[in-house]
């Protein structure tokens, strides 16, 4: 798939890393969060699903899902589990092997009991016991089911594809405020209302923000879905009731829609 990066508004080949929950760009030298993406083409993340029980990401095939559901039925997975504990260690024998350079290796044979301590750190259960199977972190996976990965781009394909340029701000007489060291600019709506737009060095309107008392609310607008989408530090979120008053939301929406209508006139 391809992603449009916010850093330079350029398309890059990318793949999805379900472990990091990040987009891996190009040859893998850069991993970015959802918030650093403007658009996604040929989204192929439906090849993964997430287990509702333990939260792990699984390949979306019947065999992979079945294999995951069976993890709690055997103690094979216990050896690599952080909840597996060795108890009653007893050294049975030691074998010394002398190397040609005078150093030596020691091979120790030990008897131990492997026990599960998940859930009850003061109580232990042998990993082959029925109690350990009930305690297993995968115990609820089979009954919990799986879900496809969902973010703003998979839920609303092409949500931010209608990109505005700085000329619409100038036509609507938005006021230039400042320019940063990287070449980005800030414009303010030409009324007594704390609504601003940030413009990239390439001239694209990257995001809007509204200041209220000591808070700043960053957002983007999608004319395709008629939605305001808030931006937090890692991802996009749909607006929650009560986040801002209805009158402020209505005023913000009206001013942003005016910019898109200006494009439609051309």
Image (cartoon, grey):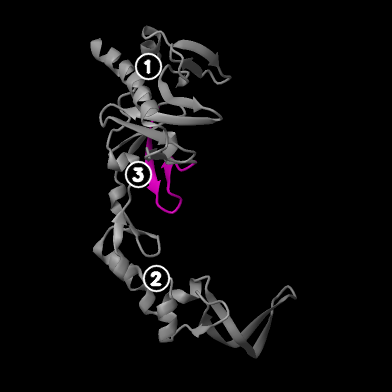
**Residue under circle 1?**
165
Look at the image and tell me in which quarter the C terminus lies.
Answer: top left
The tag earlier along the polypeptide, 1 or 3, is 3
Badge 1: residue crowd in 10 Å (few <14, some 14–19, many ≥20): some
Query: Can residue 199 be seen at all in this image of the molecule?
Result: no
Q: Are marks 2 and 1 in contact (CB under 8 Å)?
A: no
Badge 3: residue crowd in 10 Å (few <14, some 14–19, many ≥20): few
**Residue under circle 3?**
151
- Taking 195 as reference, is 60 above or below it? below
Q: State the separation of the CA atoms marked 3 and 2.
A: 25 Å
- Taking 186 as reference, is 48 above or below it? below
Look at the image and tell me in which quarter the N terminus lies.
Answer: top left
22 within the magenta span = yes
Where residue 253 is drawn, which disc sits there? none
Q: Residue furthest bottom?
A: 92
231 within the magenta span = no
Badge 2: residue crowd in 10 Å (few <14, some 14–19, many ≥20): many
Q: Position of residue 78 (x, y in %)?
A: 47, 76
Q: Position of residue 202 (x, y in %)?
A: 44, 18
């Amino acid at each position: 798939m391809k992603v449009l990066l916010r850093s330079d508004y350029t398309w890059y080949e990318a793949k999805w890393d379900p472990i990091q929950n990040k987009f891996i760009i190009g040859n893998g030298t850069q991993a970015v969060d959802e918030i650093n993406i403007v658009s996604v083409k040929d989204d192929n993340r439906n090849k993964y699903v997430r287990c509702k029980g333990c939260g792990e990401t699984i390949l979306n095939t019947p065999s992979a899902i079945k294999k995951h559901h069976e993890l709690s039925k055997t103690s094979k997975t216990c050896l690599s589990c952080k909840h597996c504990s060795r108890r009653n260690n007893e050294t049975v024998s030691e074998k010394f092997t002398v190397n040609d350079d005078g150093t030596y290796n020691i091979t120790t044979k030990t008897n131990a009991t492997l026990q599960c301590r998940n859930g009850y750190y003061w109580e232990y259960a042998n990993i082959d016991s029925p109690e350990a199977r009930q305690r297993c972190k995968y115990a609820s996976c089979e009954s919990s089911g799986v879900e496809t990965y969902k973010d703003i781009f998979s839920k609303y394909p092409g949500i931010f594809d209608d990109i505005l340029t700085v000329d619409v701000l100038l036509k609507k007489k938005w006021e230039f405020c400042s320019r940063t060291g990287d070449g980005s600019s800030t414009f303010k709506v030409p009324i007594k209302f704390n609504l601003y737009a940030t413009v990239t060095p390439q001239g694209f309107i990257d995001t809007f923000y509204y200041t209220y008392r000591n808070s700043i609310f960053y957002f983007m607008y999608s004319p395709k879905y008629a939605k305001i989408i808030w931006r937090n530090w890692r991802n996009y979120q749909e607006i929650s009731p009560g986040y801002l008053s209805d009158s402020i939301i209505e005023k913000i929406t009206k001013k942003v829609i005016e910019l898109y209508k200006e494009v439609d006139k051309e």
